Image: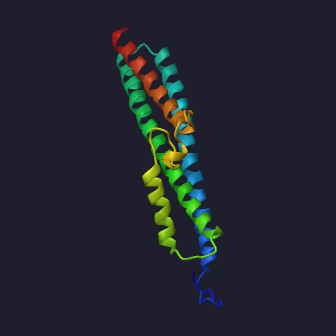
Amino acid sequence: MGGSADSNGGKVPAEQYVWGMYAEHTTQGRHHEAQRTGVATISLALGAAVAGLIASSDSKSLNTILSAFLVVFGIFAAVFAAKQGERARMHIRIATEFRTELENTSRTKTLSEIRNLGRDAHTENWSYRTGDNRPKSAREGEDKIRLYWLFIGLNLLVAALGLILLVWSIFM
């Protein structure tokens, strides 16, 4: 905190620090969502551009290489989307713990304990199948298609397009 000469000896009051950590984790959650969105946009644009290039090319070897690239890139982008979705939900879960602590009048937990509560709850409840980190009991019986899977699916479609074009370029 540097050369602050306040009554706390340069230390930030605990409540102000908790607010800062809450803001930090919500910002980090948004950051991971923005990265996931950016990669999906690039993936779709790249898929369209490469498909157009393949359609206008007569080179079998170039088409094979470009198609294989699309498969690999689409799979990478899908894995990236899954990880970014998980990271976003983790930061939101940690922010929830900080918010809960702010609402709690008896501040008996340390900041590390609050962060660990959020991480532990996230680790215990995170499901790659549903893209959700609410307690398992809170999501039983839900058959929603989550945004988490739509982002993964978009990238897998690019990989599938690459696979189709790869088969086409090899056998045509």
Residue 121 in the image: above or below residue 160: below
- Give the answer, above or below, for where 119 lies relative to 144: below
In-front residue for pair 126/158: 126
* Coordinates of residue 171 in the picture (x, y in percent): 34, 10
Q: Residue 154, image x and y in percent?
A: 52, 30
Which residue is the extreme one toward the top?
172
- Residue 168 percent location from the top left of the image: 39, 13
Please tell me in which quadrant of the rendered image residue 37 appears: top right
Image quarter hosting the N terminus? bottom right
Q: Quadrant of residue 58?
A: top left
Query: In the displayed structure, would residue 136 be above or below residue 168?
Result: below
Quadrant housing residue 57: top left
Q: Horizontal placement of 22 versus 119: left or right?
A: right
Tell me, what colour scheme is on the image?
rainbow
Residue at 51% in and 35% down: 149
Seen at 36% across and 24% down, the residue is 65
Q: Quadrant of the C terminus?
A: top left
Q: At which x and y percent is residue 90?
A: 50, 54
Q: Could you tell me which residue is drawn at 49 percent across and 46 percent down?
A: 136
In the rendered picture of this protein, how many numbered marks are placed on residues?
0
